[in-house]
Image (cartoon, rainbow, N blue to C red):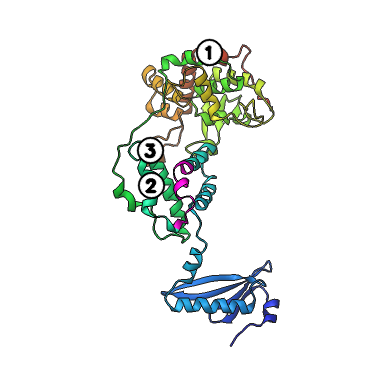
Amino acid sequence: MAHLTAARVKNAGVGKHQDGQGLFLRVYESGAKCWVLRVTVDGRRREIGLGGWPVVSLADARAKAFELRAAAAGGRDPLAEKRRGDVPTFREAAKKVHDANKGRWRSDRTAVLWWASLENHALPIIGDMAVDRISQSDVLRCVEPMWATRTETARKVRQRIRTVLRWCQAHGYVQFNMAGEVIDGALPPMPRVKSHFRSLPYTEVAEALATVAGSGASSSAKLCLGFAVLTAARSGEARNATWDEIDFDAREWRIPPERMKAASEHRVPLSDAALEVLDRAKDCHDGSGLVFPSPLKPGRPLSDMTLTKILRDTGLAEQATVHGFRASFRTWALEQTDTPWAVAEAALAHSLGNSTQQAYIRGDAYTKRRKLMDLWAQYLQGPKEISAQSPTASQSPQQ
């Protein structure tokens, strides 16, 4: 005998209201009401949403419940069938995964490259296919043609397809990950080729900075590149530096965890030459708080390609990348100083030792790093463009 009537449904308060045989009405604090059917399939309880009232009436809910109970009695899984009816295409699933991961990626460039690799190599082949229709051969069509010639790109594409299909597995859209181990046998092991960032010999860095200083690039870009070299910082760390991170009294730059690769704050001791760069950078101030703002897009940091373009325009790109100057610094520290390994690594914000050793290392060798950075600045002899003629400033533009 039914427990609910149309009138009782209309006036139902917050909570569950049983209609019998697993069908009930759930009423939320907001006043929203929805129908739910509870059935058991292969010993496992399933709760299946049947829609909201009043769009789905009591009579409609009972009719749907009857059909689903019959399916469950026949050994079928109504919830799995319902989900399969909403199976997304690979493109739709990839977009959801991409959007979900944006927050954890440390740069917009990572998000762009992640999507571009799928857009170039996967979406033209499997983008419009429902994810539960994708087979091993479909995945192989995406990666096999370039597996031997562009192995690293192929590996990344496969890994990203696998990530999307893993998300689909978690949501019940697919049973097996067709980019996983099931295709290993079709892809012969390929040696990993280590490609290091191009870097200049440290003996040529000062001359390179002088060449950059004489280029036609914007002052903001040239100063940013000089600052990155003097501090041995990563490009993104320098380009996104803000004035509130600079402590002129302490002569240091504090980079917050969210902008560091290791996700922990990094203190950078500033040499006289680095402070002089900051003094000149005040002329680039646009009110945004950025030390090196883009001259073309006020309020925005310089793009990664801006610094790369300087190297291209000056003929240095074939010999060095912006990141490669960190290698120049590290080689100089090894060959021209008695700096302990740990101190030089700390200057590059690298993690020291294995996980056990890291648990015991609580310092950052700051005092020793200050001496090292001063020696590095002295070695570079203060290229003209990144040196100020006026005394070192004592406050930021915002002070």
Q: Amino acid at mark 1?
A: Pro
Position of residue 45 in the picture relative to residue 33 (left or right): left
Query: In terms of depth relative to the viewer, which is nearer, 281 or 173?
Result: 173
Q: Which residue is mark 1?
A: 383
Residue 305's place in the image compared with 101, above or below, is above
- On-image quarter of the N terminus: bottom right
Q: Report the magenta residues as a range.
A: 117-131
- First in residue order: circle 2 vs circle 1: 2
Q: Quadrant of residue 50?
A: bottom right
Q: Which residue is mark 3?
A: 152
Spot occupied by residue 111 in the image (x, y as percentages of width and height) = 52, 41
Residue 39's place in the image compared with 96, above or below, is below
**Distance between the alpha carbons at the discs numbered 3 and 1:** 38 Å
Query: Badge 3, how many Cα within 10 Å: few under 14, some, many 20+?
Result: some
Residue 179 visible (yes or no): no
Q: Quadrant of residue 393?
A: top right
Q: Kindly check if marks 2 and 1 are in contact, taking CB atoms under 8 A apart as contact.
A: no
| Magenta stretch: dominant secondary structure | helix
Residue 46's place in the image compared with 19, above or below, is above
Q: Kindly check if marks 3 and 1 are in contact, taking CB atoms under 8 A apart as contact.
A: no
Q: Which mark is residue 141?
A: 2
Residue at x-position 50% and y-position 12%: 381
Secondary structure beneath label 1: loop
Residue at x-position 48% and y-position 17%: 315
Position of residue 22 in the picture relative to residue 362 (left or right): right
**Distance between the alpha carbons at the discs numbered 2 and 1:** 52 Å
Q: Amino acid at mark 3?
A: Glu
